[in-house]
Image (spheres, rainbow, N blue to C red):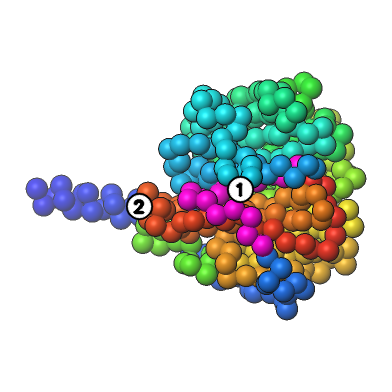
Amino acid sequence: MKKFILFLLIIMLVLGVILRVRYGGGEPYRDLSTDPLIEETALEEVLAYPEPIGNLAVNRQGRIFFTVHPESRPQGNKLLELIAGAAIPYPDGASQHRLFNTVLGLVIDRRNILWTIDHGNHGFGKARLLAFDLASGEVAHDHRFSNDIAPAGSFLQDLQVSPDGQTIVIADASFWRKKPALIVYDIQQHTARRVLESHDSVSPENYLIRNQLMDMTFIGGLVSLKGGVDGIAFDSAGEWLYFAAINQSGLYRIRLKDLTNTGLPPEQLESRVERFSDKPLSDGLSTDVAGNVYVTDVEHSSVFVVGPDRQPQTLLRSDRIRWADALSFGPGGWLYLADSAIPDQVLQTRDHIKAKGPYYIFRFQPGFEGIPGQ
């Protein structure tokens, strides 16, 4: 009996070491914060909701859509529209469980099509790209990804549509599989490719996220939250795709024409990735028509802006923001922010999640116009 107990202890020790080496650890990241360019009072509350917010998208007419974050294990509606102050299931309540499993990312293209990405429970189910025509409410596109595009352990969670409506780029943060990548999807052909897999630009560096609520470590420090490429955003002309990994010091970009060039060998594609600037540990990205890139800061409850001079600056900071997540421009120059409050939902009990509600969508005026929905 003693030998059996000793054997179990050794197995547990070995598993703990493996977990710690593969998923744990991390060094503090430097604080890039500057004096905010906008006063905290500019931040307006748009929605207080009892469940954690996932991503959001706002179209040209000001219609606001959002997901309930799948890591909170929602049992009810998963995609909703904010109408006259009330959150209404979209396209309706009856189809929520049929259409959605772990839907998270949202974007609205320039044809007024709402695109959603469902990671299929970290790739252990089928990841699904689903789109709705906002004029009719009908399904406009439906594609389930094969296992070679969205394998077990993948996490397809953010997406952007090129301005010409031909290409979708999806970010695979790959928290568990540890092979992050960009997925390039041809809308007309219904074909997808994984590119830049495990390249330095899409991979996490060894940084520990120190959020205002907690250091992002779990299971007694054996696991740290370390995500690959997450935020992605096209510039207004559709020439460049900007992208960034969560636990990464760099904001990168690559030309869309290179991403969509199927004849370009992987090593040549990698050589065309450009490190654009430094950045904070981040989540969501957006861009405006003046060439600025907006980057959320998940450690310091803030949003950064990186201008054409490539110098990151704190744009707005507020202790009301628990985890600055997705960004989406709406009409009138408003930039909307989803606060997903990740520390209060990931690996937390349902009682804890409920007690820490409500959860918020905010907005503010950054001073430049953006493309609504993106």
Can you see residue 260?
Answer: no
- The amino acid type of the residue labelled 2 equals Asp
Residue 103's place in the image compared with 340, above or below, is above
Disc 2 target residue: 351
The residue lying toward the viewer, choosing from 35 and 355, is 355
Apparent side of residue 162 relative to residue 244 in the rendered image (left or right): right
- Which residue is drawn at the image coordinates 44% and 42% (left, top)? 73
Apparent side of residue 277 relative to residue 80 in the rendered image (left or right): right
Identity of the residue furthest to the front in this view? 84
The residue lying toward the viewer, choosing from 86 and 347, is 86
State which mark lies toward you, 1 or 2: 1
Residue 316's place in the image compared with 171, above or below, is below
Q: Which mark is residue 85?
A: 1
- The amino acid type of the residue labelled 1 equals Gly
Query: Earlier along the polypeptide chain: callout 1 or callout 2?
Result: 1
- Magenta segment: does it hold 48? yes
Range drawn in magenta = 44-59
- Which residue is drawn at the image coordinates 63% and 73% (left, top)? 30
Q: How many marks?
A: 2
